[in-house]
Image (tube, helix red, strand yellow):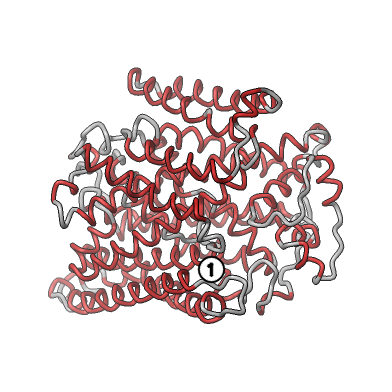
Amino acid sequence: MNAVSVVIGSICILMIAYRLYGTFMAAKVLKLDDSKPTPAHELNDGKDYVPTNKWVTFGHHFAAIAAAGPLVGPILAAQFGYLPSLLWLLIGAVIGGAVHDAVVLYASMRKKGKSLSEVAKEELGPVAGFCTGLAMLFIITITMAGLSMVVLHALENNPWGTFSVGITIPIAMGVGIFYKKTGNLKVTTTIGFILVMVGVFVGPMIQDTKLGDWLTLDTKTLAIILPIYAFFAAALPVWLLLAPRDYLSSFMKIGVFIALIIGVFIINPTIQMPALTKFTQGGGPVIAGPVWPFISITIACGAISGFHAFVGSGTTPKMLNRWSDIKVVGFGAMLVECVVGIMALIAATALQPADYFAINSTPEVFKTLGMHVDQLPKLAKEIGIDLEGRTGGAVTLAVGMTYVFTSIPWFAKLSSYFFQFVIMFEAVFILTAIDSGTRVARYLIQDFFGEFYKPLKKTDWLPGSIFASALACFIWGYLLFSGDIGSVWALFGVSNQLMASIGLIVGATVILKIADKRRYMLTCLVPLAYLFVTVNYAGYWMVKNVYLNPAAAGYSVLNGVLSIIMLVLGIIILVTAIKKWTTMWNSPRFQFGSKVA
């Protein structure tokens, strides 16, 4: 199998899906109507509710949802072979992810941009609302800490990467101020993009300087800095830091993957990983469980991800200028993220299997596989660091992309630059999810604790915003600093896909309420049926075989308890929803005339 065939076939499928299924969702199911004002116009406060250009909103939304998930997930899942990952990415994104993101965004906008927990409360009742809010607090905490850990290991003792990532913050603030003053998007974008690229290429020059020494940070220091940064990103007005940083960063991400696509077309590397490996039944060195359900748990972002519900009911619904923008921002951004996941999969599977497993398993485990590395020693020498045993997926992506780029004769001598650049751009995009996620956690805390102290409900109340932002950063920052969730990826995967199930439950409820035909509800029920069974079985498997198994390497009573609580919350929400659906299904409006399903 060659990579070009995979890329062309995948992009064609996704474009057709956007044109046909995306239009059907927008016109028939959601019935988007631009004659109605969006929450951004109705509640325009210049801080959280701000009508924003469609492509700026797309850039923010895409950068916020496309963090570590579509980069790391497909790389880890490559253990099973390229075929399961490719099928799940394409099917999951079209049938599940794009629908999920569009309906959650629509549901939130119908309720003036409220969080998913508030929407669930109004649509399904107080019990479902409380359970959804509690589940979201659990999940966002685990997600922020889990994503931050990837950043720690990407920037640890890496002054080049730390400088290049850090410089995007003042650049973004400058861009935000300049755009607000002038309103000239083209000039603002051009200046901002040039400055970001200058920051990237200046990075190597500071490595052996006093500034480089200051930016050579260990993980504990970074674990303190990241929550502090996230606090300001969550508390400051959205136009000042979060939106322009995400918008500019999206150019880098899209640009890098366009470059990777071009590189794949030039080199047309052969996919070295077999379609299916011997680890599909379980027992692999990267993921212990079998291909199902763990293919759908390991690959979340890129196929379907509950984290998107936080963004889709957090910052984005407060920014959309028109209702029809939901198709581009909600449905479209998910399909673009799927392409990112596919390119990450190609970067990983283009490596020799032995090289892939040498990076993604510990040296002790790799010795038991009976494999011998191929190109890895040569790449390690060219890059200048030891690559074996660097688990987690980030280094594999950097090595895979470096392998593709440096196969082009002009770039053959630039291995270290490409490697560091990819590490840096991964860190940038994980940070965009962290700042957006922390802002969403702030909204959740204000909604949740606002039931006990009403002023907290007001998102424009400064003391409440500061308190909620600080509390959110402290919670996930503590977990990050203490390192208590070091083996968190499976827990993150289960909780993330449970959140996606909750988003589909709420979406199905809203569709049944507004739909002309009851069968339109199947757009949510079909992916929900698969995902709910999958996530519950995966959670059960992890609790039984890992978290509460003293003999397992990932033994953790805390993770086991968290998993059980989240699965129980999901069941309560589903049972509550089914009762609601039964009542709505028999509603008189479906019994006569054109409303008959």
State the residue in front, 236 or 16. 236
Q: Residue at x 76, y 50 (%)?
A: 387
Please provide percent x and percent y for residue 153: 61, 48
Residue at mark 1: 296
- How many neighbours does mark 1 have within 10 angstroms: few (below 14), some (14-19), or many (20 or more)? many
Q: Residue at x 60, y 23 (%)?
A: 198
173 to the left or right of 314: right
Q: Tell me the SS state at disc 1.
A: helix
State the residue in front, 62 or 210. 210
- Can residue 210 be seen in the rendering of this structure? yes
Quadrant containing the N terminus is bottom right
Q: Amino acid at mark 1?
A: Ser
Quadrant containing the C terminus is bottom left
In which quarter of the view is residue 188 placed? top left
- In this view, 583 is above or below 326: below
490 to the left or right of 44: right
State the residue in front, 310 or 7. 310
- In this view, 499 is above or below 43: below
Q: Residue at x 36, y 58 (%)?
A: 25
In which quarter of the view is residue 85 placed? bottom right
Total numbered badges shown on the rendered structure: 1
